[in-house]
Image: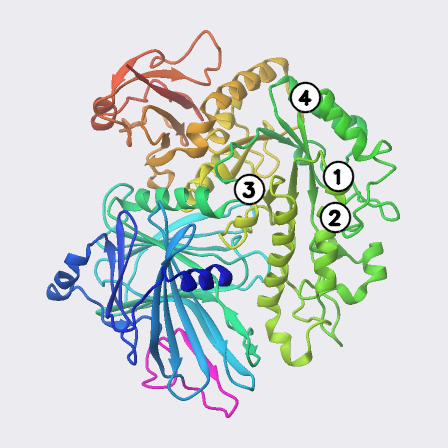
C-alpha cells in the first residue's frame, strides 16, 4: 500500500486538501462527512444516507452535524471516553493532535481518505484512514501511529474507530454464545450507561461474542424497515467495543482490547490498528446484511466469488478412527450420492505417538503408517477413482505435551517462566508461540510440506481448539510481554499471507472449536468457516440466522448430520436436515454406511437440487422473512439473484402444537412485475411434490400477500425448500 500511495502521489493524482475544510466520503447509498482544517482538530460531522456536495450546507443548517473530534485522545480536557492514550518518554500522558494535511485518492479497490495529524509538541504522528470500497456500501476506518522521536512511546489505548451516533430510540442487535451455541442473537433497548462487547480468549474471539453489532436509530429492529447502523471489527484477537450512552450523547469505540496489552512503540516504528467496517441502511437489518455480504464476497474472502463444493467431512462419521479402507468407503458412498469433496478430519497423523484421541500428537504432522499404510497417496488415488476432490484437517498452531514437537522444542510453547504449564483439550494441549519467527516458519511448513508432497490436496480445515492460556513468551523480551495478544496475531497473519501467496487456490476453512473464528480479521485468508460443532439442524436455524447478519452464505459451512444428532440427541427428518443445510454451503457430517438406501436416494436428489440453486444461495441477496426468535413456530428466509430472475425460499416448522396458527409468509426482494414458477426442490418422494410445485405466481402477489404454509408445514419438524424461476 505504501508503494502504491507513493506512486499515486508522484503521479499527482492525489487531491491534497491543505486548505479544504469538508471531506465527503461516499458509497452508492451512504455518506460520511468529516471536517479537517490544518492546525485544528479533525471533526466527525455526519454519517448516514448518501448526500452530495450540494447537500453539505444543508447538513449544517438543519443541525444534523455532530461536531465531535473524529479521533479524541487522552490528556487535555480528559472527561469522557477517548480513542487513544499514550505515555511519552518523559512521562507525559497527554496528546494534542491537530490536522497537518489530508489526502484523498483512488486505489484498486476503494476511494481512500487520509487525515494526517501531528502532536503540537511531541514527535508523534497519527494518520486516520477512511476507505470506501468500490461497488459496496461499506466504509472502513483505522489508524496508523508513528513514533518519529528517538525513544519508545507506550500505547495504553488504541481504538480503531470512535464514532458518534444520533441519540434516539436506539436498540442494539448483537451476537453471543458458547461452544455449540455460537452466534445467538440478542436485541435490547440501549439506556443510559455503557454496553460493552468484549473478548479475552486470545486466539479465537467469536465463540462467546462476535465483534459485530447493529444499532437502530428509530425503534425496535426490523428486517426491511428503519435506519440501522452496522459495524464489525476485522480482528481475530482480543477486542473491546463500547456503547457509551449519556443522555443526549452516544458514542461508539471499537478496537483491540488494550487490557493487559499495552504496546511499546519504538523510535521510528509504526503501529496499525485493525479495520473497523461499517454501513448505514435505510432498509432495516436486511440492508446491513446484504451490504456486508457483497463486500465480503468482493473483498474479504479468499475466492469469495467462486462456487463452493459439496463436501463430506469424516469427523462425526469415524471421529479419531481414521483408516485407509474406512476413508475409501466413505468416498465411494459420497461420490455415489453426487458429492464433490471428501475431507479427512482429525486422527490421521503421528507415529511415535499415534493420534488416537485428543491427548497426543499435535505438532507431529506426519502420516500415521499404522492407520494409513498407503499414506496420503492412497487416499488421493481413492479420490481420483471416485472422481471427487480430497481435503485434510490440521491444527498447526497447537501441540500436545505428548508429542515429538514438544520434546524437541519446549521453548516454542506459550508458557510463563517459573509457573506450572496450563493445558487445554485432553489435558495436554498447548499453544505454539507465534510471536517467534521460527515458529511461524514451522506453522507455514505444516501447509507447505503437505502441499509440496501432495499438490492434489484441494482443501484444508484449519482448526484451533484452545484459548491462549498462559500469557508468556520465551521469545519476546521481558519488557515486551504485554505485546503477546497483538504480536501472536501479527505472526499468524504473516503465516497466512505466505500461504495465500504460494497457494491462492487452496480452499481453507477457518475452524476454532466450531464457530470461534468467524470474523473479518481471519476471513481474508480463508474461503469459509465452520459455523459450529453443533450440527443439530434445529439449533442451526438460530445460529445461522445470527451468522447471516454479517457473513455470507458462501462462507457458512452447514452440514447434514446423523438422524440422532451427536450433540443434542435430537432426531430430525432427513428432509429437514437437508433443507437447513441447503441454506448455506451444503455439506455432510455423517457416516454413509449408517444411512438406508431410501435416505441415500433422497440425499442424491437433494444434492442434485442444490447444485442447481448453488449460485442463487451462495451469491444471491439474503432476505430474512420470519425470525425463529419471534416465537411464531416457524422460521423462513430466501435468496434472490441480483437480476431477480431466480430465488430460493426456505421455511421450517420449529415448534408443533395441535391447531397451531401458521402465519402466511410474505416474500421479499422479487420483481413485482415478474411472474415466477414454483419448484419443490426436496420433496420426500420425487413423484409427490408439494401443492405449490408448478404454480405460476406474480412477484407482486408473493410479496404483498405471500404464501400459505399451513398445509405444507403440517407435521412436526416439517420444512419446504422452493425454487422460483421467472416465467417469460
Image: 196 above or below 727? below
Taking the image as shown, residue 685 lies to the left or right of residue 410, namely: left
Label disc, if present, on residue 387 of the rendered structure: 4
Residue at 59% of width from left, 67% of height from top?
485
Q: Is residue 79 magenta?
A: yes
Which image quadrant is residue 398 in?
bottom right
Which image quadrant is residue 627 in?
top left
* Label 1 or label 4, whichever comes before in sequence order: 1
Q: CA distance from mark 4 to mark 3?
A: 22 Å
Residue at 46% of width from left, 40% of height from top?
544
Mark 3: which secondary structure? loop
Q: Which residue is mark 2?
A: 358
Label disc, if present, on residue 338 of the rendered structure: none
Residue at 87% of width from left, 38% of height from top?
369
Label disc, if present, on residue 527 of the rendered structure: 3
Q: CA distance from mark 1 to mark 4?
A: 25 Å
* Label 1 or label 3, whichever comes before in sequence order: 1
Residue at 43% of width from left, 23% of height from top?
718
Mark 4 touching mark 3, by CB under 8 A?
no
Mark 1 touching mark 3, by CB under 8 A?
no
Taking the image as shown, residue 56 lies to the left or right of residue 709, namely: left
Amino acid at each position: 500500500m505504501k508503494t502504491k500511495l507513493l506512486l499515486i502521489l508522484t503521479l499527482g493524482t492525489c487531491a491534497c486538501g491543505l486548505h479544504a475544510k469538508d471531506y465527503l466520503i461516499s458509497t452508492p447509498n451512504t455518506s460520511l462527512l468529516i471536517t479537517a482544517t490544518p492546525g485544528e482538530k479533525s471533526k466527525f460531522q455526519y454519517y448516514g444516507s448518501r448526500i452530495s456536495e450540494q447537500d453539505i450546507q444543508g447538513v449544517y443548517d438543519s443541525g444534523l452535524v455532530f461536531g465531535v473530534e473524529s479521533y479524541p485522545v487522552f490528556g487535555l480536557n480528559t472527561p469522557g471516553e477517548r480513542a487513544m492514550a499514550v505515555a511519552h518518554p518523559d512521562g507525559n500522558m497527554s496528546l494534542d493532535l491537530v490536522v497537518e494535511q489530508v489526502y484523498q485518492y483512488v486505489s484498486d479497490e476503494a476511494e481512500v481518505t487520509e487525515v494526517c495529524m501531528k502532536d503540537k509538541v511531541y514527535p508523534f504522528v497519527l494518520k486516520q484512514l477512511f476507505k470506501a470500497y468500490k461497488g459496496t456500501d461499506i466504509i472502513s476506518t483505522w489508524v496508523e501511529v508513528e513514533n518519529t522521536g528517538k525513544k519508545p512511546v507506550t500505547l495504553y489505548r488504541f481504538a480503531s474507530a470512535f464514532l458518534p451516533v444520533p441519540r434516539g430510540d436506539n436498540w442494539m442487535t448483537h451476537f453471543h454464545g458458547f461452544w455449540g451455541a455460537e452466534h445467538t442473537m440478542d436485541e435490547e433497548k440501549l439506556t443510559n450507561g455503557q454496553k460493552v462487547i468484549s473478548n479475552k480468549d486470545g486466539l479465537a474471539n467469536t465463540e462467546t461474542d462476535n465483534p459485530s453489532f447493529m444499532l437502530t436509530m428509530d425503534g425496535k429492529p426490523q428486517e426491511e424497515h428503519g435506519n440501522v447502523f452496522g459495524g464489525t471489527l476485522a480482528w481475530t484477537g482480543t477486542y473491546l467495543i463500547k456503547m457509551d450512552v449519556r443522555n443526549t450523547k452516544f458514542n461508539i469505540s471499537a478496537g483491540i482490547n488494550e487490557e493487559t496489552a499495552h504496546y511499546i512503540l519504538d523510535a521510528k516504528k509504526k503501529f496499525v490498528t485493525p479495520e473497523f467496517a461499517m454501513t448505514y441502511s435505510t432498509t432495516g437489518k436486511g440492508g446491513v446484511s446484504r451490504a456486508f455480504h457483497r463486500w465480503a464476497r468482493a473483498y474479504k474472502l479468499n475466492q469469495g466469488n467462486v462456487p463452493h463444493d459439496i463436501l463430506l467431512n469424516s469427523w462425526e462419521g469415524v471421529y479419531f478412527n481414521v483408516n485407509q479402507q474406512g476413508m475409501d468407503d466413505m468416498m465411494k458412498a459420497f461420490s455415489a450420492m453426487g458429492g464433490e469433496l471428501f475431507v479427512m478430519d482429525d486422527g490421521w497423523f503421528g507415529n511415535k505417538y499415534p493420534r488416537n484421541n485428543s491427548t497426543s500428537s499435535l505438532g507431529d504432522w506426519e502420516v500415521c503408517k499404522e492407520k494409513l499404510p498407503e499414506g496420503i497417496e492412497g487416499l488421493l488415488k481413492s479420490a481420483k477413482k471416485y472422481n471427487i476432490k480430497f481435503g485434510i484437517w490440521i491444527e498447526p498452531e497447537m501441540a500436545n505435551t505428548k508429542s515429538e514437537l514438544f520434546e524437541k522444542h519446549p521453548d516454542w510453547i506459550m508458557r510463563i517462566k517459573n509457573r506450572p504449564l496450563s493445558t487445554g483439550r485432553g489435558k495436554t494441549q498447548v499453544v505454539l508461540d507465534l510471536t517467534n519467527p521460527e515458529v511461524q516458519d514451522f506453522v507455514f511448513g505444516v501447509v507447505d510440506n503437505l502441499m509440496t508432497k501432495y499438490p492434489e490436496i484441494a482443501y484444508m480445515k484449519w482448526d484451533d481448539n484452545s484459548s491462549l492460556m498462559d500469557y508468556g513468551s520465551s521469545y519476546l523480551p521481558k519488557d515486551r510481554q504485554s505485546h503477546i495478544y497483538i504480536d501472536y496475531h501479527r505472526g499468524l497473519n504473516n503465516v497466512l499471507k505466505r500461504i495465500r501467496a504460494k497457494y491462492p487456490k487452496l480452499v481453507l476453512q477457518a475452524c476454532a472449536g466450531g464457530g470461534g473464528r468467524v470474523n473479518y480479521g481471519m476471513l481474508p485468508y480463508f474461503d469459509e468457516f465452520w459455523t459450529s460443532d453443533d450440527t443439530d439442524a434445529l439449533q442451526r436455524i438460530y445460529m445461522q440466522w445470527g451468522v447471516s447478519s454479517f457473513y455470507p452464505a458462501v462462507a457458512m459451512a452447514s452440514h447434514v448430520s446423523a438422524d440422532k444428532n451427536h450433540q443434542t440427541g435430537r432426531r430430525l427428518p432427513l428432509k429437514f436436515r437437508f433443507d437447513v443445510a441447503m441454506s448455506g454451503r451444503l455439506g455432510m457430517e455423517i457416516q454413509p454406511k449408517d444411512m438406508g438406501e431410501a435416505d441415500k436416494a433422497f440425499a442424491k436428489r437433494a444434492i442434485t437440487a442444490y447444485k442447481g440453486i448453488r449460485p442463487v444461495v451462495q451469491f444471491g441477496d439474503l432476505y430474512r422473512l420470519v425470525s425463529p426468535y419471534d416465537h411464531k413456530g416457524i422460521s423462513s428466509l430466501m435468496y434472490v439473484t441480483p437480476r431477480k430472475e431466480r430465488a430460493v425460499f426456505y421455511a421450517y416448522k420449529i415448534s408443533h402444537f395441535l391447531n397451531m396458527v401458521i402465519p402466511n409468509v410474505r416474500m421479499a426482494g422479487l420483481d413485482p412485475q415478474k411472474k415466477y414458477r414454483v419448484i419443490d426442490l426436496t420433496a420426500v418422494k420425487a413423484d409427490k411434490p408439494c401443492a405449490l410445485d408448478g404454480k405460476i405466481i406474480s412477484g407482486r402477489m408473493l410479496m404483498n400477500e405471500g404464501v400459505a404454509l399451513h398445509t405444507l408445514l403440517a407435521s412436526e419438524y416439517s420444512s419446504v425448500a422452493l425454487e422460483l424461476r421467472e416465467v417469460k
